[in-house]
Structures are given as C-alpha cells and as structure tokens.
Image (spheres, rainbow, N blue to C red):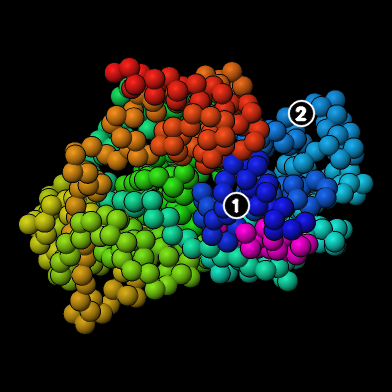
Amino acid sequence: MTHTDAVDVLNTIYGYDAFRGQQADIIDTVIKGNDALVLMPTGGGKSLCYQIPSLVRPGVGVVVSPLIALMQDQVDALRALNLNAQFINSTLDIDSIRAIEADLRQGLVDILYVAPERLLMPATLALLDALDIAVFAIDEAHCVSAWGHDFRPEYMGLSVLSDRYPDVPRMALTATADRRTREEIAKNLDLVSAQHFVSSFDRPNIRYLVGESQGGREDLWRFIKAFHPEDSGIVYCLSRKKVEDTAAWLEKKGRVALPYHARMSAQEREHNQNRFLREDNIIVVATIAFGMGIDKPDVRFVAHLNLPKSVEAYYQETGRAGRDGEPANAWMSYGLQDVITLRQMMQQSAADDQHKRVESHKLDAMLSLAEMTGCRRQWILDYFDEPGSAPCGNCDNCLTPPETYDATEAAQKAMSCVYRTGQRFGVNYLIDVLHGKSSDRIVQFGHDQLSTHGIGADISAADWRSVFRQLIALNFLSVDLEGHGSVKLTENARPVLRGETQLQFRRQLATVKPKRERSGRARTPVSIAAGDQPLWNALRALRKDLADEAGVPAYVVFTDATLADMVQKRPSSLEEMSMVSGVGDHKLERYGLEFMAVVNEFEAEIDDA
C-alpha cells in the first residue's frame, strides 16, 4: 500500500507515465485509510482517484453512482483493462445478481458500482458487512445538496457508511460545488474530518459563447454547420416539446439527432444514450435529465437553446464538452421569455420559501453571467471561490468586447410606460404602446392618449425587448408570475426614474459565433498534420471495428489522445507501443499487434513512395 504501488498500477494497467494535478496526493491519502472530499473539473481524472485505491488496498472498491444507465459503460471501460468490475442494479435478473454476489464473497471483484438506493437496501448492506472493502467512493456528491440542481434525497442516507464501516476510507467526488455545497457534502455525508482537495475550476479548452436569440434554431444551425459539421454534441432545451421539435428539425437538416427526456421510456432513453456513446457524429437534444456522469471524451460542443437555472447547472452541463482536453465550444442562445419561464417555474414549484429564495438568487447569478460585458471565464472562476484570474482571451466577450451604451433614457421610457399603463400588461403590449400603435385593445384602454404613447418609435421592437430583458434581469422590473406575465416596477426602479441612477446596457448583437481560425476552418479536435491524416483515419477505422465487435464505445478501446500519440511515435515494436500514452499491459497484449500492423503498413507505403 505505497505510492510506488499506485504509480505501478497507473503505468501497467492504465498506460500513463505520471499522475496529473492533485491525483497523487488524493490517492495517497485514501490508500493510507483517510477520508477525502475531491472537487475536480469534468475530465480532470476523478475516476482514477478511486479506482487506483480500490486496486491497491485489499478488498473491493464500492462506487456509489446516481444513474444506473451509465454503469454499464464505466464497467466496460474497466473490463477493457482486464479488471473485474461489476454493477448491481435493477437491470439484472436475480440469477445474475447472485452470481456477482458469489464472486464478491470470494474476493474476485475489483470494483463494484451501485446506485444509492440499492446500496441502502438491507440486503446490500448485509452483503457488504461480509466483505473486505477497500474504499467507498461517492461520485456526483453534489447530489447530497438540497440547494443543488441535481439533488437526490437518497444521497442523504449515505451517512450510514460512517457508522457502519468506520475503518473503511470514504471519498466524495464532484465536479461542481461552491463553498456552501462543499460544506453540505462534508456535513451530510459525515466527512467533517476529510481532507479537502479542490482543483481549479478552469477548463481552458472550453470557449464560452453567449448571445441573445435572434433566429432561434437557425442560430444553432449556423453555429453547428460552420464549426461542428461532423462532431458529437449535446443541445439542451428547457421543455420536452422543444427537445423533440429540435431533434426532428436537426434530422431534416441532415444530422443524426436523438431526443432524450424524462417522459420517454427507459428503453428509448437507453437506446439513444448508447448510440451517442458508441457512435461518432451524433447529436443528443435533451433536457437536463441527460448527461450526469457521461464519460464520452470527444463531445466537441454543448449548446443551450434556453437559459439554465443556475451557474452550477450551466457549468456542469458545459463541462460535458471537451473531456479529452481538446478545444470545445459552450454556446448559448437565450431571450426574455427564458427569464419569465424560469421565474414562473420557481414560483409554482412545491419548494418552501427558503428554497425558492435560494433558487431565485442562483437564477440572478446566471442572468448576471449572461448579461455581463467582461470575461466570462474570470466571472465563473470567481463565482466558484477562485478569484484573481486574468481575462481568458478566449470567451466571446474577450474575443469581441461587447458595445455598451447609456440606456438611462430608454429605461426611463420603458418604466414610465409600465407605470402609466397600470402595471397590468406584458412586454409585447408595452412595446406596441411605445411604438405608438393604435390597436383596438390600446384604444379600448385609452392608452393611445398616454404621454408614453409613441415616445419609443425610434427604437426597434428587438431593441426594446433587449431593454426590457435587461431591466428584468437586473431586477428593475419584475414579472407577475401567477398571472399573465404583466410587468411591474420594483423598488430599484425609483432612483432610475428620478434620474439619480445611470444605466449602462450591452447593445443587442446577433447571437455570438466563435471566430474562425486563420485557415477559415474550425480547429480539429486533435492536432494531426495533413500528411498524417491517412494513418489517423486508418487507426480510427480499426478502433471502430474492434469497438463494434466488443459492443463498447470506441474510446473504451483507445481514446483519440492515445491514437494521436500513436501517430506521432509510430511504434514499430511492442516495446515502443507500450510507450504510447494510454497503452497499458492488457491493452498492449490485446490490441498492440493490430494497431502496430496499421502503423507499419503506413510506414511501408511511405518507404515505397
């Protein structure tokens, strides 16, 4: 149980030369029998932090994972390393479960995955009582936070592990947790004495792009067509109907787009998720029900067609892009209706007042991120208690600084119109009054006689919607969430109307697009020289054939990063193949000769040319 043992496992089983970041310290802490709370961004290598202690310490590593649909792929990846990994969940019949239990009792299982509900069953706890357990790893630990976007009540029961197995080290791992959530995790899981390992939240490979919705789905299509015409990606929508409509629309555009939402049958969701994980160039259009724990490393973009509920949700969802560390885009388009809809959903929820206040504050923070004019990455890092970073130079605001203007007069006109119409009408009606229209409704209410009738004719409807959206986002106006969306003044409006406060708004722009590279093409996921493309394509083709034969995602055979290193090193012997990053002993034995043959064939063609 030494650090040397851990490094040996890293080299021989996983095929990597050295640990990254805090991995070595985390693993050493747990191997010594101590508890740990690990916060590490998506793609940072959290799984190694519990897998290696499970292999080095005596006994089986027990991993608590919230979604049974993802366990199969995690187990497949471990079995590809010649490890005996198993899961026990409701997808298995009783005979399969009994066979796994028999293997567990004989000490034949390296790592076991269970959902929290399953682990807390008396029969499962009785089984664990009879086993040597190396470590308990509680993945997606933010689910224990009652204020989080992925709250799972059953996580609260996992504190039983502390009392029942006091000599077994426990770890809680998550990619998304501010200081308050980390405190909740430690308290609710009885990890108050655990050592905390908080890695940087920065994902420099992700480019954040946020803009106002101008053309709806057409904005999305222009983005995908220009920068991700053949890439895998995820598109998030707020409603199930929008998910289905958008997926069908993308299919008509020629892309393979699969819907995913809670109203689909479990079989449909599993089928679509498996296609996404195991095939290339698939787009999943989903509600937030999709993605927790997704291991697919080559998701090149995450798009939001609606505003997320919180910065935590946004960070978690965008973090599913670029897990391999290669360039990826986080693109979002949103509008005024998103703000109104989210506030209505919060108001109508069954949560208590305290919970609603927390949700409202989190939405306000998300609106601040969306409307800000400075560096978005810098703001996100500051939000997660990581202040002091420099502007990233890679988000939309850094690449194309937004234009701002003195919006005080426009805001005063908008708020005066709200007041003089009795604070009983929605944004579209107010814009009609500001434009001086004389519809039957406006005449009926006598609003064509108001001093605000026609005072905004020089400002377009789109620009007025931008003004109203920013006034609502910044809490100068509120929306009646229980009625028909009528706009009302808040206390914050008073100093603006009196001329005591000046407002600077960002000028409306078309939905932001990432800048193209000088070549006019988007960056490729991995750096492959033009002359090496035939070898790269041949290696990918072999990988796909082997993955299809085994019924696993392609990255379970080898990741893109491993194939890229193979292209660069051109191994001509098994010894040289073992030096490729990500090629451990078992994969060398299983795949080495076949991949080496492709490299040698390519080299022979060069020699003959």
Q: In 3D space, how far apart are the residues under numbered discs 2 and 1 (Cα atoms)?
A: 27 Å
Q: Give x and y (percent) for residue 120.
A: 81, 48
Question: For the view shown, which residue lies furthest in the front direction?
Answer: 607
Q: Is residue 29 magenta?
A: yes
Which of the two marks, 2 or 1, is nearer to us in this view? Answer: 1
Residue type of the residue flagged with mark 1: Lys
Q: Is mark 1 on a helix, strand or loop?
A: helix
Q: Residue visible at 62% across and 42% down?
A: 14
Quadrant of the drawing holding the C terminus:
top left
The segment highlighted magenta reads 24-40
Q: Nearer the viewer, residue 321 or 573?
A: 573
Residue type of the residue flagged with mark 2: Leu
Q: Examine the image and state in which quarter residue 216 appears.
A: top left
Q: Give x and y (percent) for residue 404.
A: 17, 65
**Residue 46: image tag:** 1
Q: Examine the image and state in which quarter residue 365 appears.
A: bottom left
- Mark 2 / mark 1, whichever is N-terminal: 1
Quadrant of the drawing holding the N terminus:
bottom right
Q: Residue visible at 39% across and 24% down?
A: 603
Q: Residue visible at 31% across and 51% down?
A: 209
Residue 418 horizontal side relative to residue 140, left or right: left
Q: Which of 447 and 527 is in front in this view?
A: 527
| Count of numbered tags | 2
Q: What element carries label 2?
A: loop
Q: Examine the image and state in which quarter residue 414 appears.
A: bottom left
Judge the density around disc 1: few (<14), some (14-19), many (≥20) Cα neighbours within 10 Å.
many
Q: Give x and y (percent) for residue 317.
A: 47, 48
Q: Residue visible at 64% across and 47% down?
A: 10
Q: Is residue 483 magenta?
A: no
Q: Mark 2 points at which residue?
A: 92
